[in-house]
Image (tube, rainbow, N blue to C red):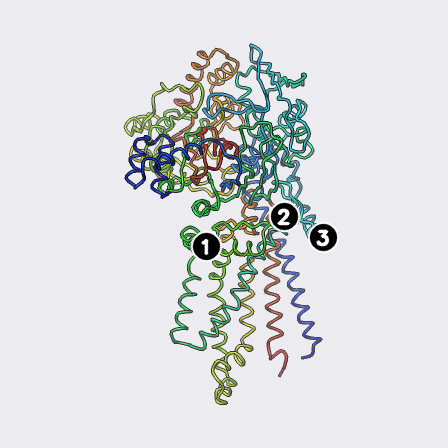
Amino acid sequence: MNAGSLLGLVAQRIALGLVLLLAASALIFAGTQILPGDVAQSILGQSATPQALANLRAELGLDQPALARYLSWLAGALQGDLGSALSNGQDIATAMSHRLGNTLFLAGTAAIIAVPLALILGLVSVRYQGRWPDKVISGVTLATVSVPEFMLGYIAMFLLAVQFQVFPSVSTIHDGMSLLEKLRSIALPAMVMVLVVLGHMMRMTRAAILNVMQSAYIETAELKGLRRFTIISRHALPNAIAPIVNVVMLNLAYLVVGVVVVEVVFVYPGMGQYLVDHVSKRDVPVVQACGLVFAAVYIGMNMIADIVALLANPRLRHPK
Amino acid sequence: MNDELSYYLSRSLKGAMSRRHFFGRAAALGLTAAAANTLMATSLRAQTPQKGGTLKIGMQGGGSTDSLDPALAANQVTFQLLRMFGEPLVESDPSGTGLQMRLAEAVDSSPDAKVWTFRIRRGVTFHDGSPMTPDDVLATLRRHSDESSQSGALGIMTGISDMVVDGDNVVITLEVANADLPYLLADYHLLIQPKGGVEAPAAGVGTGAYKVVNFEPGVRAVFEKYAGYWDDSLGHFDSVEILVINDNTARTSALQSGQVHLINRVDPKIAGLMARAPNLTVTDVAGRGHYVFIMHCNTAPFDNNDLRMALKLAVDRQDMVDKVLMGYGTVGNDFPINAAYPFFDDSIPQRVFDPEEAAHYYKKSGHDGSPIVMSCSDVAFAGAMDAAALFQQSAQAAGIPLEIRREPGDGYWSDVWNVKPFSASYWGGRPVQDQMYSTAYLSSADWNDTRFNNPEFDALLTQAKGELDETKRREMYSRMAYLVRDEGGLILPMFNNFISANSNDLQGWINDPTQDLMNGYAPHKCWFA
């Protein structure tokens, strides 16, 4: 296969991603329309008078038809204008870029620890397959995956913040902090997130490599008398990359969009908390914008995984 | 100093333990009398306000949607933020029964309580350096009373026929006499802003003791002491940081790990445990807030007073206070007023759980025996589902088939409260009886969530507003309480206390029944030892 058609495949995959994103935007908009309650009531809460409600509704343009609002929203989003929050008038793009930055910082830190750790643990498991290191790694990661995040969070908080006061229990970060202070501040949520995604990635690495280990060329390598660890890392791992990248990307996407609970528990000012607050206030433009960003992250990560798989698959590079 | 000793010392300073007793304990712990005396003296010195330090408060009740616009404040955190940087004309007294002057120096009314004159304090400046004038006051009040305003204070600003500036005074003329007008103007929304805050309502500029340095909605707000503040007796910290920590466990552990000095809304379930920690103090203050079950008096089957009475008698109030509030509250008597209010009539008999009497009224009501459905969610108040379950059980003992329907917390205030004929809710209380009754029990009130329509009550309320004779007024309020209690659709089993907790280095706490965290004045009146 030549480079041109490979590029064509990649372009096709990107185009598909964009179509998916458009479909997601329509779904998000439709979904937010059927939420119970309305934003004016939620903003004013129990203290809403009918007069104040009517005033607020008119001001927010809630009397326009849905399709018109969808189209103008989509047009704005394409130009990077996500509108302003209904509840407090903040510009969404500005507020959200700050929040997204925080979330990416936390997710990135967790990923930098989790991905190499998962690969190493996976390799070690395969090397000592069926023996005690394999069993310990499998057992521990299975346990951390099975415990709900908030439970892991509370346990970490109780031990490391309240009992021994190693790390702060509240992970508020702000601009005035140095990188080191920020890292110390997010130690606990990052730790919890590493534990949450580690098991999945490690087990997939282990399974993928073991799968490759059944192949004929591995047998050849063994017959050549290579050391087992060299066989695993040099011959098996590169060929197991596609499925591993797949699961790694899925978990990275989870680190960005699935950390709502962790963010709430540790009071981390990221996207999750931002979204939850605005959902409860029926702040539709913000909910839509968050939905769009989350969808883009998910679709983007999956797209990258697909493209890497395309590039890494020897059968694509060497067609029969 | 060891924990045990510091615990005894703090108890002794609060008067919970005699000095003699303290010295005895100190001796038992191996301290000489002289050393104990020095310790006592040092700690007593700490009882006078010290300046400096950064106070950190962890609070529940905020979100990313918060704004600094006073008109939009509707939760606990925004209330506290407004307290930090702004001030109203007058403030209710911590005793709960009087007024303190803030930006007004004096208040005077005409004999018929229709024309009110507020003399505005001179020499007060806004955080932007401009002087605060009567014109700013007028513009602020105008903004909140404008018919097209979104202000949460719009309801209490109705009935004003005219407002003018007269020299140092702002003169307010009312359509109907109201002896309580100054109490209404103590509302937290009504902080005075430059030019009324019309152009930049959310700029966070006020006359308060602290000025806004940084504000990230739903995350944190940082304030520093305003150097030009007019009142030396308030605002002892150099800076104050408010962290929004909505999660109960996170808030508690932030205090325990020393990340914050003060937290609000301690979960009653763990308040007792926290109070045992040697370096923490838990304070609970009986306030005006109450947890309620609301029946619509105009909707079947609740349009039958015998059935309403049966349900009222079928509530085991003490049991609810013990099990839902864990004792951090007091029993209610089916009208929204308690001893924290001026003109409270304590001679009204307390309604108690009486299954036989309840069964009697239930039979008398002629209800067909079908389940009576109550809508509920824990959003209504903390522990609402538990309270509903207790209600169901006690009603069962009286032979009343009560069915609890769990509603989604999302949209509870728009789809359930004030919509379904029987639901759970809460009220935060108001500074005076008139405001509480006008807000929710007057036939024409926007928030008449019990659909209480009683001409005698309405007439009494209007009459009491303008009555300056205290004895007569007291009698009127008493009669109104009986009307709501015996004919209304309100079941009020309990008044909840404000429970907060702080580290022991925070001094100067004063119980204030008006609102959480000393009516929001903890950062102004407290200091570090």
Q: What amino acid type is highlighted by mark number 2?
A: Ala
> How far is disc 2 from disc 3 in space, using C-alphas?
17 Å
> How far is disc 2 from disc 1 in space, using C-alphas?
31 Å
Horizontally, residue B301 falls left or right of residue B204, namely left
Residue for badge 3: A79
Q: Chain of mark 1?
A: A
**Spot occupied by residue A106 in the image (x, y as percentages of width and height):** 55, 57
Q: What amino acid type is highlighted by mark number 1?
A: Val
Q: Of all residues shown, which one is farthest toward the front?
A: B34
Residue for badge 1: A166
Residue for badge 2: A95
User: Which mark sits nearer the N-terminus, 2 or 3?
Assistant: 3
**Quick one: B26 or B454, which is closer to the camera?**
B26
* Number of dots carrying numbers: 3
**Quick one: A209 or A37, which is closer to the camera?**
A209
Q: What amino acid type is highlighted by mark number 3?
A: Gln
